[in-house]
Image (cartoon, rainbow, N blue to C red):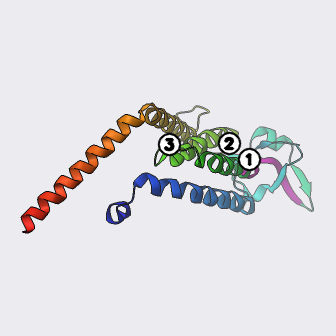
Amino acid sequence: FYSLIKKVSVGKILDTYSLGLIVVHFTTSLATFFSREYFGEYTDGRFAMQVPVDMVSVEMITDKMRQHIEVFGGERLIQVMPLFILELIWSFIMVVILICYHGRKTFEGELFLVYLASYGFGHFWIEWLRVDGIRLLETQIKVTQIVSAFVCVLSIVMLIYSWSQSDKARQKRTREREARKYSKRRKNSLYIK
């Protein structure tokens, strides 16, 4: 509605929002560190995170995690892969992509579509590593992966379609749109007199 009232391109507004959305995504990734709710399978890697078993629902604890439960200070802990680190790294990569791409954009809304494609791509793979989530009909595929893949593919298709439109065709449509607006304004001004 704002774009209609202020007569600003929706694509321009979405391009502006795209960097803000990454900042929000970055912040929520940090919040998942404190809540310890976003983690993957057991790992003994350098960036492993230990989570008290009491803080995790029983369904989230896999057999591999059960085999490696540690006791520290009388508290049982599972050692898992902290996916929030991957989210933070991917958010940073998306910021770099959008900042570098900003000067190359050819149409309004392109930056937002690049954001959606990159977010969908990264989120699909990070969700693959997550141990919990709503799965699709007794498969290993999570619903969030399907949504992420759909958003990514749809954004890429829209980008390819928009790029395939020649500049002349785009300029012609813009001229026709402006001519319709002008004739409509002219008609309205004739009725007012």
Q: Hey, what amino acid is under mark 2? A: Ile
The residue depicted at 30 percent of the width and 45 percent of the height is 175
Residue 167's tag is: none
x and y, in percent, of residue 65 in the image: 80, 43
Q: Hey, what amino acid is under mark 1? A: Leu
Q: Return the residue found at the far right.
A: 73
Label 2 vs 3, first from the N-terminus: 3
156 in magenta: no
Q: CB under 8 Å between callouts 1 and 3?
A: no
Q: CB under 8 Å between callouts 2 and 1?
A: yes
Question: Pointer 1: what residue?
Answer: 86
Q: Please state which of residues 79 and 126 is positioned toward the viewer in this rendering.
A: 126
**Which marked residue is nearer to the observer: mark 2 or mark 3?**
3
Q: Disc 2 versus disc 1: distance between alpha carbons?
A: 7 Å
Q: Secondary structure at mark 1?
A: helix
Q: Hey, what amino acid is under mark 3? A: Thr
x and y, in percent, of residue 114 in the image: 55, 43
Question: Pointer 3: what residue?
Answer: 106
Q: Which residues are magenta?
A: 75-86
Please name the predominant secondary structure of the magenta segment in the image: strand
Q: Quadrant of residue 164?
A: top left
The residue depicted at 64 percent of the width and 41 percent of the height is 122
In this rendering, position of residue 83 left or right of residue 132: right
Residue 81 visible here? yes
Q: Disc 2 versus disc 3: distance between alpha carbons?
A: 30 Å
Image quadrant holding the C terminus, namely bottom left
Q: Please state which of residues 146 and 133 is positioned toward the viewer in this rendering.
A: 146
